[in-house]
Image (tube, helix red, strand yellow):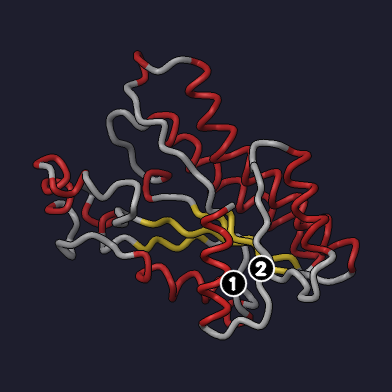
Amino acid sequence: MEKLETFASELEKLGAASVLPVAMDVTDAESVKQAFAAMSNHQTPLNVVVNNAGISGEALALKQTADQFDEVIATNLRGVWLVATQAARTWKDAGHGGSIVNIASIQAERVAPGLSAYSASKAAVVHLTRSLALEWARYGIRVNALEPGYIHTEINSELWDQDYGKEMIRRIPMRRLGRAEDLDGALLLLASSASSWMTGSTLAVDGGHLVSGL
């Protein structure tokens, strides 16, 4: 919660009129319901939901336990479904639409050793995005997905200084890691009315990684 409150303060300094930090466990249906209930009492209506919670669960398949596999699926797929359906239910009851952006991964389109659960979960997120888009278009609810490539984050920062990480970067056609801000344009497109006739779409933001075939 402390990180959320810090981020809320940063947003307010940038000019956001009102920010409400709400803790949510996306694997817990009751936690998701309570979070949306808290948001419903806020002065600003909910218009956009970004499903960004995810874990890698990195492990070779023969060494990964069933519980570890289930944990990845619970966070990366079930969590997306729980949050998306709660948002859609909220908007449908209120009589207006909204935009849902699901964060998938280029691993939805390709595979790598040690990421079988992760890749499967992200591929499922892409297909779930299309399915929900079809069901909810009639309500004015749009559902799209982003497929980020390798992005430098706080979690993976140590990897890129290792030989293995450097080799991964060399496989990216643009020869550099993505930055968090590289996702801004695509995310704003899908979240805003600029994409008002887009739903069920998936955008890759990966420095050309998918087209390289590497």
x, y percent for residue 49 = 65, 62
* Residue visible at 23% across and 59% down in the picture: 177
203 sits left or right of 27 in the view: left
x, y percent for residue 200 = 60, 60
Q: Residues within 10 Å of mark 1 (few under 14, many from 20)?
A: many
**Residue annotated with mark 2:** 48
Q: Residues within 10 Å of mark 2 (few under 14, many from 20)?
A: some
x, y percent for residue 191 = 59, 72
> Callout 2: helix, strand or loop?
strand
x, y percent for residue 172 = 19, 56
| Circle on res. 155 | none
**Residue annotated with mark 1:** 191
> Callout 1: helix, strand or loop?
helix
Q: Classify 66 as above or below 131.
A: above
The amino acid marked with disc number 2 is Val
Q: Which residue occupies the foreground of this view, 96 or 160? A: 160
The amino acid marked with disc number 1 is Ala
* Residue visible at 34% across and 42% down in the picture: 110
Looking at the image, which residue sits at the far left? 163
What is the C-alpha distance between the residues marked 2 and 1? 6 Å
* Residue visible at 89% across and 67% down in the picture: 94
Marks 2 and 1 in Cβ contact (< 8 Å): yes
* Residue visible at 31% across and 56% down in the picture: 151
Q: Which residue occupies the foreground of this view, 110 or 100? A: 100
Q: Classify 120 as above or below 171.
A: above
Residue 57 picture quarter: top left
Count of labels in the image: 2
Q: Which residue occupies the foreground of this view, 203 or 151? A: 151
